[in-house]
Amino acid sequence: MKDQGADMEASFWHEKWKRGEINFHQSEANPLLTVHFEKLNLAKGSRVFLPLCGKTHDIAWLLASGYRVAGAELSGQAINELFKELGLAPTISEAGKLTRYSADDIDIWVGDIFDVSAEYLGPINAIYDRAALVALPADMRKRYASHLMQITGAAPQLLISYVYDQSKIDGPPFSVTEDEVRQHYGAAYQLMPVEVKDVAGGLKGKVASTETVWLLQKISS
């Protein structure tokens, strides 16, 4: 049975893209990615998964840096714009309930991330989660984290989270505390905060917030 909450979440994001309300979309690669990505110690050609990727410029940076990219995104509009901005003509095919957009070194699945399977995704060397965990409401984050680990084999992650007084403004991005990050991922990963900084001007210019970059390395069995 389809999750009604997930349907409401989907319509929320589709409307944001349709209206151009994408202030969460940055005009260049995230400096937290460009500074800390090397901590994942990936060989060139490694395949990096970006959940809920939108049309982020982080993808262009990863491709230009010699990595392959896989992504999942709800909005087909975002992915059409992404490929246009990358100057790539994707091959488009159906994959179950998803639509797959592919070109050299890049594969994006459009649809519900919970419909993305390990079989569809293929081998993943690392995850870069700038906007997925923090985009989901609290009742979906545990399910998301479990699903993400399952489809990627708990690949190492670079994860970005925010902490702020959520009674003052609504997410997304939502406030996700260190305790919650550890609840979701502590059994599978060693977690290391590699940078904690104040959000300049406050989150959405309204509320004091800290931003944390986490390095998650799989615990050896």
Image (spheres, helix red, strand yellow):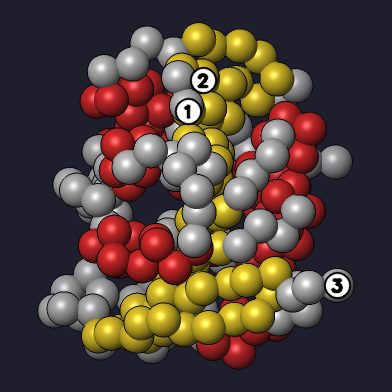
Residue type (three-letter) at the residue carrying disc 1 = Ile
Which of the two labelled residues, at mark 1 and mark 3, occupies the earlier sequence position? 1
Could you say whether the residue bearing mark 2 is in a helix, strand or loop?
strand
Q: In this view, does 69 lie above or below 197?
A: above
Estimate the spatial distance between the alpha carbons at disc 1 and disc 2, rounded to whole Å. Answer: 8 Å
Mark 1 vs 2: CB contact within 8 A: yes
Rendering coords of residue 84 (x, y %): 28, 19
Estimate the spatial distance between the alpha carbons at disc 1 and disc 3, rounded to whole Å. Answer: 31 Å
Query: Is 213 positioned to the left or the right of 4 in the image?
Result: left
Which residue was labeled with disc 1? 106
Quadrant the N terminus occupies: top right
Residue type (three-letter) at the residue carrying disc 2 = Tyr
The residue under the point 51% across, 20% down is 101
The residue under the point 48% across, 28% down is 106
The residue under the point 53% across, 43% down is 46
| Crowd class of label 1 (few under 14; some 14 to 19; many from 20; radius 10 Å) | many
Query: Is 184 positioned to the left or the right of 31 in the image?
Result: right
Which residue was labeled with disc 3? 221
Rendering coords of residue 55 (x, y %): 34, 37
Residue 194 vs residue 170, the one in the foreground: 194
Residue 122 vs residue 147, the one in the foreground: 122
Which of the two labelled residues, at mark 2 and mark 3, occupies the earlier sequence position? 2
Which of the two labelled residues, at mark 1 and mark 2, occupies the earlier sequence position? 2
Rendering coords of residue 220 (x, y %): 78, 73
Q: Residue furthest front?
A: 43
